[in-house]
Image (cartoon, rainbow, N blue to C red):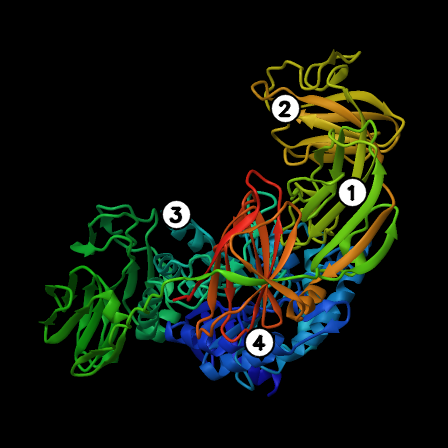
Amino acid sequence: MNRTETIEAVRVDSRGVWIDGRPRTLLCASLFYFRLPREQWRERLEQVRASGYTCVDVYLPWNFHESAPGRWSFEGRRDVAAFLDLAHETGLYVIARPGPYICSEWDGGALPAWLGLDPELRVRQNEPRYLERVTGWFDRVLPILAERQYPANGPVVMVQLENELDFFDCADRAGYVSALRDAALGHGITVPLIACSGQGDLAGATGDVDGVVPACNFYPDDDSPDIEAEVRRYAGLVAERGVPLLITETNRRHRTLRRLLASGAKLIAPYLQSSGWNFGYTPSTGNWGRPGNFMSHGYDFGGYVTSTGARRPEFAEAQVLARVLDMWGAQLALAEPVLPVDRPECDFPTSSVSAALAFPEGGRLVAVPHLGAGPGTAVVGGVPVAVAPGSCPLMAMDVPLGAWGIDATLTLASADLVAAADGMLVFSSDVPVTVVLDGTRAEIPVSERVTVAGVAVVVLPSAEAARLRSVDATVRVADAPRPPAESAPAAVREMRRRCDAAPEEPAGRHTLPPALESLGVYRGRGAYRTTSDLTGVDELLLTGAADIVDLSVGGRTHPPIAGFGAARRVDVGDVTGSVAIEAVVEIWGHANFDDARLPALRMGALRGLGTLWKVRGTTDVSALWTVHGHWAQSPAPTRVLGGWSSTRVAEPVTYGRTVHSPTPSALHLRGVVEPLRVNVDGGAPQTVHAENPWVLLPAGTHRVAVTLPHHPSGPALRAELLTLEAVRDWSCAAQNDELLAEFAARSGRTEAVRLPLALKPGEEAWLDIDLPPSPAGYLVRLDATQVRVTGWAGGECVGRVWIGDRPAFSGGDPDTLWIPPRWPGLTLLARGVEGRDAPGIRALRLEVPT
């Protein structure tokens, strides 16, 4: 197929999306091959098709296919070509999203961890070293997509470049996106290239590069009355660029999706409708708002299919909306958003701006969202109609019905029209429907059939409309699916404990602790060991550590540290003399957002122990700061830090003083609330946050300036200077994910144990468990305290859970492991962690997912 034929097959313009010369409104569900067992791909794709959605969007994670530099795999669960072929067989279109950055709460946003080992390489920038690496990825993945473009050999109808670049501080957006575009074109990609904005900055996402279509991601409050106003604005902005409104990510609730549709969207892709799993060491860290958020093994945000494949009630809502789209077809695909001439009057909470779509052949659809919880009535076109709470019917007004062989005009219908044939109209509603046909008005109860102006009008409850099969002289509805039989959880009482510990790969001796990535550990964990004299040392300071640090000093195990580079003080006043220090550092996942508040949450930040310091002394330096700014005159007044009094609230004030230390030191600013700036010796200012109020200083005398907004009602600032001595001479060992998986799959000498199993802090137990066959696999739930558990099955790391005192988690259920069906064996690595309770596993239960 030549380029011209492909462009004719799939194109976009200001009116909409065109496929095979016909306008289409696309409902698209995210479905990720890398978050599912390969044997479930077809079933999940067919499930999406059964929902009525016509498209799936799929990320392609670079670091899933290049697990180490130059080590590529597109086989087994990584066979993305097979997944795309299955989507094609299922009759689904595909929007392919190869990145190179994907976000998706995935390890590093799919950027390989070793990129951070090159100090001159700058990720997500128009920078030669980075683009050279991206070229290697695109050279592998883009030919797979090019060969499967619609309609020649596959389902790919669009390709997305990058992802939400407007969240990231890219210095040359136009140059960067142009480089990605040129690579795509050079590999024969001829379907539309798109780039999505995560926070509405269209130019920030696309660089305004020619040939790259801007798309939008919207994540509003589902109950907000202002969704339509925002979306209509963006529909107008993209129309000025000659393209339609493509919503590449949004909420999952179909009431919201209807509001987006009525506001002009031509592609609607809720994220994430079909849920999955973060297998192994693939979850990210640093997700949303709170710094250091961990992503769970389950990847589920309440979409219409659960992680185990069960349908939620929203699945039926999807089927009804899909029937509405099919019913109106090209009319809807080419409809233009308009403001209703007469805004519906509602006795319930609704949108602040009405939304309607004008059909090119006459008539319109008016969206009437009910944002409340009680019964409601709206007056539409002067006619009072019932509106169910939580719904958003798309009400037809002044629509000629000749296309369906009905010689009449549908003046008003207060519910979704889901079918029309042979003189019959079928509506979906859970409240009585008002219909006005050629001036004849009738109210039809749910589950009733009434003749109006010679036309048979049928109202199906929404649950039945979702199962509508056919309409001719009668209306046929499929039987309701039977709920799956529930089974009681099976308790595991006995297991086999391995007598051997997992091997380590020696990684040499180092003056200071190196990053795990420099030891070849991109996913997994490593150990750092040394012996140091702590005579006269009451505390240690750990800086730059990530992700999870289990620290033992002189035989005493400390609670896990998950500070993502924030400085942490460690009390060691109960040990003295020459003591052994050991740190086991586990990579939960690399940051997928660029969060400047913590060092290890920056894009490309490395993992490892960081630097461990002995604190040799602490000096309060809160006093004797000179004040500059506001009306302070010369000579500069001397005050305590933050102590200048002024009426100019929120205006910046700069405090300066000299500090001296013969060794490296750390300035600790206590009481920081709002971010402030610290300048050392006139250099570039550093931003200090409440999450990490520390500034490291080299040995010597320094002039420190602290600039902060005047906040008279804020807490008092205190400053202390810690003099430091680095702990040196470390012996390192590596346990990457492949080594751990190989050991988990290996048989060895074991001994039988029965639950409960007590563990000491820092103690590890490798446990083998026999699972009876289950066609649905198992959910493994632990009744435990203060343990981290990693599970393996079928030769692969399944996932991890952390029970007890732990950081915040996002995503699905953080306390459950899922063992896929036909993944043989189950091996758990349980590690006791220091906390409020004694570590141990009381019980382990197997649930068959429904």
The crowding category of the residue bearing disc 1, from other C-alpha atoms within 10 Å (few below 14, some 14 to 19, many at least 20), is some
Q: Distance from label 4 to label 2 (Cα)?
A: 52 Å
**Residue 25 place in picture, x, y as percent:** 41, 70
Please tell me which of labels 4 and 1 falls first in the chain: 4
Q: Distance from label 3 to label 1 (Cα)?
A: 57 Å
Vertical position of residue 629 compared to residue 532: above or below: above
Check disc 1 and report the residue beneath it.
581
**Kind of residue at disc 3:** Asp
Identify the residue shown where x is 67% and y is 19%. Answer: 642
**Kind of residue at disc 1:** Ile
Give the quarter of the figure containing the C terminus.
Answer: bottom left
**Residue 807 place in picture, x, y as percent:** 57, 44
SS of the residue under disc 4: loop
Q: Distance from label 2 to label 3 (Cα)?
A: 34 Å
Check disc 4 and report the residue beneath it.
191
SS of the residue under disc 1: strand
**Kind of residue at disc 4:** Val
Check disc 3 and report the residue beneath it.
226
For marks 4 and 1, give the one nearer the viewer. Answer: 1
